[in-house]
């Protein structure tokens, strides 16, 4: 073990070289030198790892613990890619990407620090352990969320079955309402239509009979037969029209006999015999009409022969009269057959009206306002069903959309029915003719002006609504099948038990990992208990059906949700602990870097002060001339300036990298202070590059040093506070969530004190700026051993210094004021949170 400790000491020295080489420079000459040094250190690092490997092999038999630690260090070095990162730094230096090289150099420094800790037995495993716990927590939380989703989907399955029945019911009711709107009694409508056609045929037949009757006396030898011929021709045309109507009536009655009742027919209806009997009578009428037509044609031909008034005219006239009389008889028989069919259908119409009255149904058409109310109720039920599908996904989501579309179409139908109620009522149907007489049958009244269009719109919307309901039902059935295929209750029960077991192991693993109010073990213990209860209820649900099954699954879901909540609380506590440890680690790294930076900055300041003396001495010896070490061949001063520019550039990049590091960790004041320091360092880089080593540059360098001192002091105090906080985690005491929340929103006390010190320093420097410059100008004027020209030059230099310092103070004041304003907003926000 002593050899291991000794080895660790050597490693610490070597790491100092590694870490120094990790910081790049801006100067080309220095850059090349740093690249070469980085390559040499990389080679040394590789040899160092080889020596570790050899030592590990040697120590295995005699010092297994030390060998194990070396192997752990070697494994970490490989996992952290330290070698690759060193190569990256060299490449960035070669490419003159110095800022990126500086940032990557910090990563190398951090990795080497951890490697050092492992070898010295001082590594901090808490961060890795908490990250591991967080990863386990996230994994189990994801599994639990999947189990909750499976439980919800299986519960949805039962609901979907009920909803499919509701969709079918809605479809049937919409179909029924649509049929009511079209006609509550299609049979009666078809009968009325047939009666209307029969009446038209009767009118035509009566007209044809009258024409034949008028033509018969005019069939005599001579010119009167020409009149008879014309009358018979007109009657024959009318007879043809009546015959065509009879054929249409026959076709209509045949359709009535073969169509089902819902389509207005009488198929498989006892009253079908009456329809067929009426059809037979119309068929007989058609035969008589055909015969009458032929006889009219013969009579017309004979009337044409009689009109010649020759020796055959008398015989032709007698034959024509005989044919006309036969046509009249056939026409009367056809008319009687139609009247018999009419009487048959009128009796059927009266029978239908009696049946509806006996069933308690009104014989008139339904009122649009009543249909509108029914449509509105149906729409509201459909909308409610769609809302209950809100949580569905996949095919279930498609079902919801189709149900919503159905509701929209129902709304259109409702609006159309509302317009029907407002814009005109349909006329009342007429009364049927008296049985046994060729009287006028009743005629239905005409609908209102826009009623037909509104009725058409309502019908079309209802049709689309039914189509969408069918789509919704199909999609819901597919969604239910998907759930059946994807989830099984017995598998879910088994998975839930596995989650409970995993939580038990996680609780054991997390025990005492983060003590105090951030101890997650109790949350994990409660989560495990709830997960176990959920598994039991899901197992019981396998044996249940109906409402009991639903209750068990609902109870399991509640337990799952509570387990998830406990897991989230445990994760939050672990994240808080991880944040604290990472902050401590970051501040330790910054503290170490600030210490090194302060040392380098002090060297730069001392060197600049000496160069300032060199400048003053040279300019005293060379009045009126400006010091330029290159022109004066002062090689020592040139090399010193290059070295200081290079180091100050490195410090500026390191300050920027640390500002980002602390900003990422949630610090508010420290990053801004480091940015100010960085700006001052870049100012020094610029001034030293211009050979400006006088009081102005020295003043800026002194400000940098003082700020670094204050910053180091504040960071150290902040780090001490965090370590004390970490040490007190195991002590009892109730948590204060409101105070903790407020602390997360506000900067630390060390940061606030740092901000106060900066403001005080600005105030002091601002106050001294005018009086100090005035005093130095007076002292310069009082000098007697220099020329007036030299006095003027020095006074101008003092005034320029005052101007430059004033600008810098104004810039710093603006940044401090912005920080104060941000701090005030944070305090107000924190108070609101309380």
Image: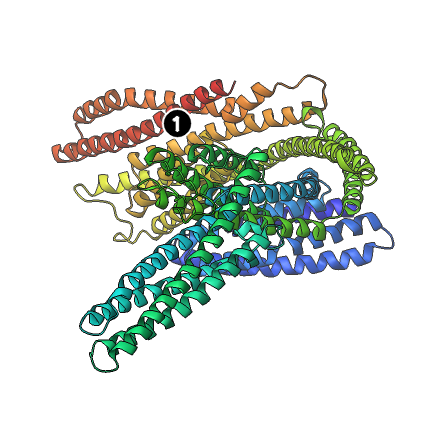
The N terminus - image quarter: top right
Residue 740 image offset from top left, x and y in percent: 58, 22
Residue 207 image offset from top left, x and y in percent: 31, 58
Is residue 623 toward the left or the right of residue 323 in the image?
A: left
Quarter of the figure with residue 583: top right
Q: Please say if 93 is above or below 544.
A: below
Q: Nearer the viewer, residue 342 or 734?
A: 342
Residue sitting at x 78%, y 55%: 56
Q: Is residue 5 visible?
A: yes
Instruction: Give the tally of numbered discs.
Output: 1
Residue under label 1, please give it: 819
How is this picture coloured?
rainbow
Q: Nearer the viewer, residue 339 or 534?
A: 339
User: Farthest residue in the left direction?
Assistant: 788
Residue sitting at x 82%, y 54%: 59
Element assignment for label 1: helix
Q: Please say if 75 is above or below 581.
A: below
Quarter of the figure with residue 314: bottom left
User: Farthest residue in the bottom direction?
Assistant: 311
Residue sitting at x 46%, y 30%: 668
Is residue 513 toward the left or the right of residue 678 in the image?
A: right
Q: Please say if 220 is above or below 736.
A: below
Q: Is residue 95 visible?
A: no
Q: Please say if 456 is above or below 221.
A: above
Residue 272 image offset from top left, x and y in percent: 58, 53
Is residue 595 toward the left or the right of residue 764 in the image?
A: right
């Amino acid at each position: 073990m002593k050899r291991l400790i000794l080895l660790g000491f050597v490693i610490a020295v070597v790491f100092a070289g590694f870490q120094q080489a990790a910081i790049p420079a801006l100067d080309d000459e220095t850059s090349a030198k740093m690249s070469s040094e980085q390559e040499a250190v990389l080679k040394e690092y590789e040899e160092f790892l080889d020596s570790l490997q050899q030592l590990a092999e040697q120590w295995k038999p005699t010092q297994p613990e030390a060998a194990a630690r070396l192997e752990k260090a070697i494994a970490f070095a490989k996992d952290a890619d330290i070698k690759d990162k060193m190569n990256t730094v060299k490449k960035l230096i070669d490419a003159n990407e110095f800022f990126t090289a500086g940032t990557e150099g910090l990563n190398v420094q951090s990795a080497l620090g951890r490697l050092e800790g492992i070898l010295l037995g001082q590594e901090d495993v808490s961060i890795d352990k908490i990250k591991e716990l967080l990863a386990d927590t996230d994994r189990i939380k994801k599994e639990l969320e999947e189990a909750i989703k499976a439980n919800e989907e299986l519960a949805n399955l039962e609901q979907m079955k009920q909803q499919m029945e509701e969709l079918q019911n809605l479809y049937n009711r919409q179909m029924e309402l649509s049929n009511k709107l079209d006609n509550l009694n299609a049979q009666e409508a078809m009968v009325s239509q047939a009666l209307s056609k029969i009446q038209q045929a009767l009118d035509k037949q009566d007209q044809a009979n009258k024409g034949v009757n008028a033509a018969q006396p005019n069939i005599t030898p001579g010119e009167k037969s020409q009149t008879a011929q014309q009358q018979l021709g007109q009657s024959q045309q009318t007879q043809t029209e009546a015959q065509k109507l009879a054929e249409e009536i026959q076709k209509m009655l045949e359709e009535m006999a073969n169509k089902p009742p819902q389509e207005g027919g009488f198929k498989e209806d006892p009253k079908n015999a009456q329809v067929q009997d009426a059809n037979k009578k119309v068929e007989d009428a058609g035969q008589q009409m055909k015969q009458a037509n032929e006889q009219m044609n013969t009579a017309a031909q004979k009337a044409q022969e009689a009109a010649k008034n020759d020796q055959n005219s008398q015989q032709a006239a007698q034959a024509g009269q005989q044919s006309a009389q036969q046509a009249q008889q056939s026409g009367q028989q056809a008319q009687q057959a139609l009247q018999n069919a009419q009487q048959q259908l009128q009796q059927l119409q009266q029978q239908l009206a009696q049946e509806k009255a006996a069933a308690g149904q009104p014989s008139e058409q339904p009122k649009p306002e009543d249909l509108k109310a029914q449509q509105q109720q149906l729409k509201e039920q459909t909308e409610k069903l769609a809302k209950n599908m809100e949580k569905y996904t996949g095919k279930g989501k498609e079902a919801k959309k189709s149900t919503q579309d159905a509701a929209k179409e129902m709304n259109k139908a409702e609006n159309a029915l509302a317009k029907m109620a407002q814009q005109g009522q349909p006329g009342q149907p007429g009364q049927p003719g008296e049985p046994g007489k060729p009287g006028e049958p009743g005629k239905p009244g005409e609908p209102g002006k826009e009623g037909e269009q509104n009725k058409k719109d309502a019908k079309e919307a209802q049709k689309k609504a039914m189509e969408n309901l069918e789509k919704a039902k199909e999609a819901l059935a597919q969604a239910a099948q998907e759930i059946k295929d994807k989830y099984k209750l017995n598998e879910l029960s088994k998975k839930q038990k596995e989650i409970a077991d995993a939580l038990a192991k996680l609780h054991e693993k997390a025990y005492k990992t983060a003590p105090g109010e951030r101890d997650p073990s109790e949350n994990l213990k409660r989560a495990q208990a709830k997960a176990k209860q959920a598994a039991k209820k899901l197992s019981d649900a396998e044996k249940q059906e109906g409402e009991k099954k639903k209750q068990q699954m609902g109870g399991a879901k509640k337990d799952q949700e509570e387990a998830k909540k406990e897991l989230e609380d445990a994760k939050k506590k672990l994240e808080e602990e991880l944040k604290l440890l990472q902050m401590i680690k970051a501040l330790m790294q910054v503290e170490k870097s600030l210490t090194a930076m302060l040392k380098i900055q002090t060297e730069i300041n001392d060197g600049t002060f000496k160069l300032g003396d060199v400048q003053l001495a040279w300019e005293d010896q060379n009045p009126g001339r400006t010091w330029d070490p290159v022109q004066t061949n002062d090689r020592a001063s040139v090399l010193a300036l290059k070295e200081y520019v290079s180091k100050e550039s490195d410090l500026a990049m390191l300050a920027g990298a640390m500002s980002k590091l602390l900003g990422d960790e949630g610090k508010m004041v420290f990053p801004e202070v480091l940015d100010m320091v960085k700006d001052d360092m870049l100012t020094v880089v610029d001034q030293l590059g211009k050979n400006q080593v006088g009081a102005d540059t020295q003043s800026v360098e002194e400000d940098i040093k003082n700020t670094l001192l204050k910053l180091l002091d504040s960071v150290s105090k902040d780090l001490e506070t965090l370590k004390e906080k970490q040490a007190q985690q195991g002590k009892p005491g109730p948590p204060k969530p409101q105070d903790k929340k407020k602390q997360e929103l506000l900067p630390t006390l060390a940061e606030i004190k740092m901000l106060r010190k900066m403001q005080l320093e600005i105030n002091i420097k601002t106050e001294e700026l005018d009086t100090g410059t005035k005093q130095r100008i007076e002292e310069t004027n009082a000098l007697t051993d220099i020329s007036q020209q030299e006095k003027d030059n020095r006074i101008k230099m003092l005034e320029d210094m005052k101007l430059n310092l004033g600008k810098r103070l104004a810039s710093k004041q603006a940044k401090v004021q912005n920080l104060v304003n941000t701090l005030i907003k944070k305090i107000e926000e924190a108070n609101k949170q309380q």
